[in-house]
Image (cartoon, rainbow, N blue to C red):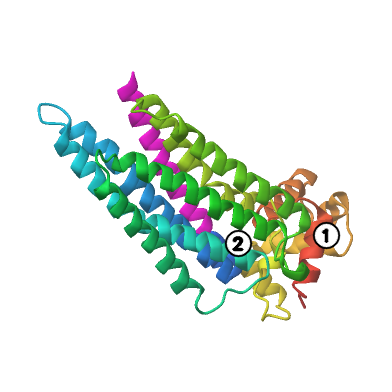
Amino acid sequence: MLTILVYLVFIISVALSAGSIVLTSRLRNRYKSDVFSILLYYEVFIYTFGFYGIWGQVVIRAFLSSGISSEIPDKFSNFSMLLGLPFLVFGWLMLMQFATGLSGKKTGKWFVALFLITNFSILVLLGYIITKTEKPDPMSSIRNYFIIMNLVYTFVASYMIHFPWKGRSLIHEYDRRIISPVLFLIMMAQCAPLLFYADQVWLGMIFIFTFFAGNTFLPLYLTYGTLLSAFTDESVDKISFGEFCTRFEVSPRESEIVREICNGLSNKEISDKLFISLQTVKDHTHRIYIKTNVKSRVQLINLIKELKIL
């Protein structure tokens, strides 16, 4: 039963990581914003840690635990975690930069260097403490390190998103009130199983699931849960209607419906004018909402106004 659970969680982990990276790539390609490039790097780094540092241990213990001394799997497991930790550090760096960009702040030119020096110094200190301990337990030390640092960086990121710099946030206040607390709650859900973990397979699978599922929140919410007009390139004062259709992959027929919606026509009036059924108009309108990530006619019209479409 536990073997089936492990295989199932692994498949889900692969699906969640691939889906998150695809969604983030689409956001970056569509909106051409540096914020989404940083989010993409965060997803790549954090999931790389997930497979190297977390799933690597599971695989090593599964294949090396039978018929040999327990010291060998432990050494390979520790090595796998050490390979993954740099990706975790870079993932936290990207989270900090993403939150900074989202809140309208700008990081100083020495921020990246200072962040990396600080974190890798902590890792060196952690390694020194482990080697000097009479009965070292590297995995427990690394687990505590993950809990503490994850708490610190998620709290800072949530704080920056919730309290933007002088009102210069790239997202609406409603979205800030959702993203900020949910990020922190996800961190709590990820760390909770580790507080009680003592080589229980089922508890380890709960942690792995919450780790991979939790990191899908940002791509999912920013794709389906909010209006993203604020993420468009600030250097673009206005775009043509054709560029709008290209950016949001709006078809020629859908573009006609967008024009008529902006002209104030109802679905019935659009149906009569374009000689198509009322249901067809509703279907096209629904797809337009999905592609432009809006939820109503008012939001669609506001999006076009904000883009200053000619």
Residue under the image location 80 percent in, 46 percent down: 278
Q: 111 or 135: nearer the eye? A: 135
> Magenta stretch containing residue 244, yes or no?
no
Q: Name the mark on residue 261.
A: 1
Q: Which residue is mark 2?
A: 99
Circle 1: residue type: Ile
Residue 310, compared with residue 55, is above or below; it is below
Residue under the image location 85 percent in, 53 percent down: 272
Answer whether labels 2 and 1 touch (C-beta < 8 Å): no
Q: 275 or 157: nearer the eye? A: 157
> Magenta stretch containing residue 14, yes or no?
yes
Is 230 on the left-hand or right-hand side of 121?
A: right
Determine the secondary structure under disc 2: helix
Residue 105 appears in the picture as rendered? yes
Q: 202 or 12: nearer the eye? A: 202
The spot of residue 252 in percent (x, y) is 66, 64
Residue under the image location 80 percent in, 58 percent down: 299
Is 100 on the left-hand or right-hand side of 25?
A: right
Give the residues in magenta.
1-24
Q: 275 or 249: nearer the eye? A: 249
Q: CA distance from mark 2 to mark 1?
A: 35 Å
Circle 2: residue type: Ala
**Quadrant showing the N terminus:** top left
Residue 118, compared with residue 130, is above or below; it is below
Determine the secondary structure under disc 1: helix
The 10 Å Cα crowd at callout 1, few under 14, some 14 to 19, many 20 or more, is: some
Labels 2 and 1: the sequence-earlier one: 2
Is 205 on the left-hand or right-hand side of 103?
A: left
